[in-house]
Image: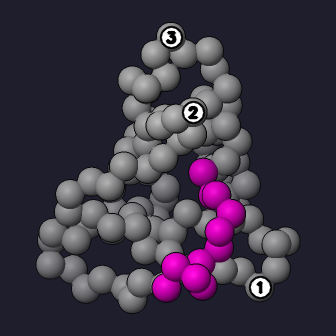
């Protein structure tokens, strides 16, 4: 399924979050956005979905959009262990605080 505008990102994980898991703490979800270098690993912690930081990776974020009319963007997951030139990280206070996934 393609989602060029990113509008389905949050819906997919919200649907998974709502399922009646026997052991939600054991659920692992791997996501690969089309612009990511590799899969990201997500798990449920205290009833909330969180991305686990994987060794050799970093999520780089764009500055927040000018208005709330734009869908939130999760940033780009890059491999940091392959010698590629990495983008400059946006300071946390300039990122979109809305969850994208």
Residue closest to the eye, 4 or 74: 74
- Residue 96 placed where, x, y %? 65, 73
Residue closest to the eye, 62 or 34: 62
Mark 3: secondary structure? loop
Q: Earlier in the sequence, mark 1 or mark 3?
A: 3
The image's colouring method is: one colour
Callout 1 crowding tier (Cα within 10 Å): few <14, some 14–19, many ≥20: few
Residue in view at x 49 percent, y 22 percent: 24
Q: Which mark is residue 66?
A: 1
Instruction: Give the residue number, with chain letter if any, for mark 2.
Output: 47
Distance of label 1 from label 2 (alpha carbons): 31 Å
Q: Which mark is residue 54?
A: none
Instruction: Give the residue number, with chain letter if any, for mark 3.
Output: 22
Q: Earlier in the sequence, mark 2 or mark 3?
A: 3
Distance of label 2 from label 3 (alpha carbons): 13 Å
Residue in view at x 43 percent, y 42 percent: 42
Whether residue 75 is visible to the viewer of this picture, yes or no, is yes
Q: Quadrant of residue 12?
A: top right
Q: Examine the rendered structure and indicate whether residue 22 appears above or below residue 81.
A: above
Q: Earlier in the sequence, mark 1 or mark 2?
A: 2
Give the residues in magenta. 91-101
Residue closest to the eye, 43 or 29: 43
Callout 2 crowding tier (Cα within 10 Å): few <14, some 14–19, many ≥20: few
Magenta includes 99? yes
- Residue 37 placed where, x, y %? 34, 62
Q: Quadrant of residue 36?
A: bottom left
Residue in view at x 38 percent, y 44 percent: 41
Mark 2: secondary structure? loop
- Residue 63 placed where, x, y %? 60, 83
Mark 1: secondary structure? loop
**Side (left or right) of 3 relative to 83:** right
Q: Are marks 1 and 3 in contact (CB under 8 Å)?
A: no
């Amino acid at each position: 399924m393609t989602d060029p505008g990113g509008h389905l990102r949050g819906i997919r994980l919200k649907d998974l979050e709502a399922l009646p898991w026997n052991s939600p703490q054991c659920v692992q979800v791997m996501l690969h956005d089309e612009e990511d270098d590799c899969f990201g690993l997500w798990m449920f912690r205290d009833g909330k979905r969180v991305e686990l930081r994987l060794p050799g990776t970093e999520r780089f974020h764009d500055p927040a959009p000018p208005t709330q009319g734009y869908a939130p963007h999760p940033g780009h997951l890059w491999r940091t262990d392959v010698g590629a030139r990495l983008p400059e990280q946006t300071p946390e206070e300039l990122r979109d605080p809305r969850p994208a996934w």
